[in-house]
Image (cartoon, helix red, strand yellow):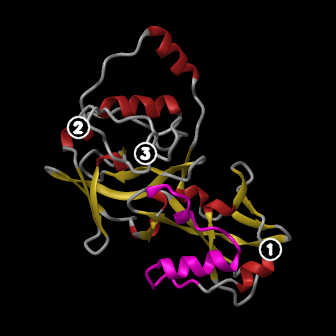
Amino acid sequence: MLRSIESLKGSAVAARDGVLGSVDEVYFDDEAWGVRYLVVDTGNWLNGHRVLISPYSVKHTDPGASTVSVDLTREQVKNSPGINTQQPVSRQHEQDYLRYYGYPEYWGGRDSWGMGGFPMLGPMQIGPGIEPESLEPDELEADALSQDVHLRSSEAVTGYHIEARDGSIGHVSGFIFDDESWIIRYLTVDTRNWWPGGKTVLLATEWVDTVDWFGSSIVTDLTREAIKKCPDYDDLVPLSRTYETALHTFHSKDGYWTKGNRASR
């Protein structure tokens, strides 16, 4: 099901033994546009600290009840590696987090979640909260040198300028993701600061050519005229495959669901 990141914000995150807090924002990676973590505000429980919850632990999301259920306990989350969400989260920090929970690394594989298209734990994976064997010293040293950052904040990217082939067209106003694969499929773009009386349109993440993370801008090869005339998007209406097909056909693009990967359907 396709839904907006905005619909997650404020949702209660329920562990097996109680509520952890509420979703504040999400972190996605800048390579596959995958939602890798929910950033959860723990409120009074952990003195307002924010913690990361991986989709690997999510049992289901319930848009109607505004609840995200996770297969964790409050004690596991309380004892998880501390991460300063006010600073960039490096791969080293992610590795520490994933080792603690026994989750696989999602990067470096053939698919959006390593070896698969969904955040599912295989039979060989270690259970949450159980640390695997320690890495050898040379592996730890190599990891320590890997401080590259690939996570981006949904809050920070909201407002990025969108540049078409022939000029500015608006700014990012939101994100649409698949709640099974946890991949962001579309950016919602508010065109009204470029086109008086304009509208909100969808820009598929597959149609993004480049992103300037320092200059806060996103470039697409679509033209302003094509974007202006594309099928109207109504965020009050559930996003259907019929609409997606019409949008891709209008822009003469292949649908992500036609590419053979089950996570793309």
Q: Residue at (36%, 52%) from the top-left corner?
A: 40
Apparent side of residue 257 relative to residue 170 in the rendered image (left or right): left
The one nearer the camera, 252 or 193, is 252
SS for callout 1: loop
Secondary structure beneath label 2? helix
Q: Amino acid at mark 1?
A: Thr
Mark whose residue sits in front, 3 or 2: 3
Residue 100 rendering spot, x and y as whole percentages: 32, 30
Residue bearing mark 1: 223
Q: Quadrant of the N terminus?
A: bottom left
Mark 1–mark 2 Cα distance, whole angstroms, equals 49 Å
Q: Secondary structure at mark 3?
A: loop
The alpha-carbon separation of the residues under discs 1 and 3 comes to 34 Å
Location of residue 165 by image quarter: bottom right
Query: Of marks 1 and 3, which one's residue comes earlier in the chain?
Result: 3
Upstream in the sequence, badge 3 or badge 2? 2
Q: In this rendering, which labeled residue sits more in front, label 1 or label 2?
A: 1
Please state which of residues 20 and 241 is positioned toward the viewer in this rendering: 241
Q: Amino acid at mark 2?
A: Gln
Q: Is residue 263 above or below residue 250?
A: above
What segment is highlighted magenta in the picture? 233-262
- Does residue 74 appear anywhere in the picture? yes
- Find out whether the residues at labels 3 and 2 contact each other: C-beta distance under 8 Å: no
Indicate left or right for 20 with 94 as reference: left
The residue labelled by disc 3 is 116
Report the residue at 42% width, 56% height from top. 181
Seen in the picture, residue 67 relative to 215 is either above or below; the reply is below
